[in-house]
Image (cartoon, rainbow, N blue to C red):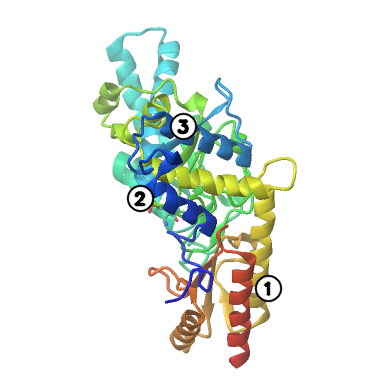
Amino acid sequence: MPSREATAYFGAGPAPLPTAVLEKASQVLLNYNDSGIGITEISHRSGDAEKILESTKSALAQLLDIPTQEGPDGYQIIFLQGGGSGEFSASVYHMTALWVEKRRQQIVKELGTEDETKVFDALRKAVDDEFKLDYLVTGSWSLKASQEAARLIGANHVNVAVDSRKDNNGKFGTIPKESEWSLTPNPAHSGMLYYCDNETVDGVEFPAFPDVDSSKYHVIADMSSNFLSRKVDVKRYSAIFGGAQKNVGTTGITIAIIKNSLLTQLAKPDLLRKLNLPVGPVVLDWPTIAKNNSLYNTLPIFDVWIAGQVMQSLISKASTDGPKIATQQAESEKKASLLYGILDKYPVFHVVPDKSVRSKMNICFRIGSEQDRDDKEKKFLAGANERLLLGCKGHRSVGGCRISNYNAVSVEKVEKLAQWLEEFAQQQ
Ligand code: PMP
């Protein structure tokens, strides 16, 4: 049986966790804090649970430099269930309710009356004529999010401002320039500008915050697969979310960072129903979860604890001033450039995405030519498995190879894989 130390695991999620955290986890599962009760057995409403929640939030705020003050410009950190996919829906429900209420208030002002029928008629017309959610479709996950939006509110309200497959032979792998995006021209008509910061399946990552005016568009990003891998200018986002199971912890919680100004002034469910707009389940409702300190219903506190421990381990290795994630960012970049360096050195390898948008987290490549690709990739993966370099197969929807370079994958393990890449290329 291979040991954990001998194995290097490059799976895309669930993904490796630091061994020290798992060792401690195995103890607290049996007996948390010398209480005689295991961590999965304690109440989510206990003092211990509350402490875990608070320290995890504080660690995240330190790592990403999140402004957590009260008032409209501060942010809430909340924990939800339902995965990243749950947030595809939650963001639609929420941003729709926000847009409708803002527009309603404006109509009241414009008409100079609160007359319900008059206001409602004008609002219905505004929803029909104006209301859009903008999506940047740059990979499989933003595509899924946009499809969920169309399912919930109707395709007529979803503006796919960019579909990067269009200029790339029908495949994901690029991010067209901002000047080529067709955002809803009047930002007041746009409920949000949604994008996925790192596309796990396609290996495409935004190199930086997109060149859009975040004071006019509500920018919301899915950071499920690059959460805690690099610095983030949180202040430019209306909301950020990510499932924990890749770079942060165990499967079971989703973390969302939401600007306070988003959490008030939302259309009431009755009004949304009258407008034929959807009302989401309460467990996905950001204000409800925020108001209840993420404890509206039973939260898997063990998963929050794991995330907190992972965050503490990142803080303790931070060596610079400023956002504490900078140290981890440097390590991620070092590991990614080692791998891309070898992939670029040998013509037998073909990195899938364009150089300008290569992900530091999910490194996607093909081997060989169209004729011998199946054979070569099979050989590469079999050789990797023999060497206990596991989880290098690409996502089933696209094939090929994918190396996930998450934080818990050490430099040494990446070096081991790099060695096999070199060896394999030299055999060709
Ligand atoms: N977004 C991204 C970028 C992902 O990689 C994934 C899962 N791999 C999801 C969303 C969906 O997450 P979940 O499976 O937690 O719903």
Q: Which of 97 and 189 is in front in this view?
A: 97
Q: The C terminus is located in which quarter?
A: bottom right
Distance between mark 1 and mark 3 Cα atoms:
44 Å
Q: What residue type is labelled 3?
A: His
Residue that appears at 41% across and 54% down: 143
Q: In this view, does 293 lie to the left or right of 152?
A: right
Circle number at residue 147: 2
Given contact means CB atoms under 8 Å apart, are the residues at marks 1 and 3 in contact?
A: no
Q: Nearer the viewer, mark 1 or mark 3?
A: 1
Q: Name the residue under label 1.
A: 341
Helix, strand or loop status at disc 2: helix
Task: Give whichever of discs 1 and 3 has the lower sequence position.
Answer: 3
The residue that mark 3 highlights is 189
- Mark 3 vs mark 2, foreground winner is 2
Mark 3 surroundings within 10 Å by alpha-carbon count, few (fewer than 14), some (14 through 19), many (20 or more)? some
Residue 410 in the image, given as x and y percentages of width and height: 60, 64
| Residue type pointed to by label 1 | Gly
Q: What count of labels does the image hold?
A: 3
Rendered view: 14 above or below 148: below
Using the rendered view, name the quadrant where residue 176 is placed. bottom right
Instruction: Please state which of residues 186 and 19 is positioned toward the viewer in this rendering.
Output: 19
Identity of the residue drawn at 49% across and 77% down:
388
Q: Residue at x 59, y 81 (%)?
A: 420
Marks 1 and 2: which is nearer the front? 1
Q: What element carries label 1?
A: helix
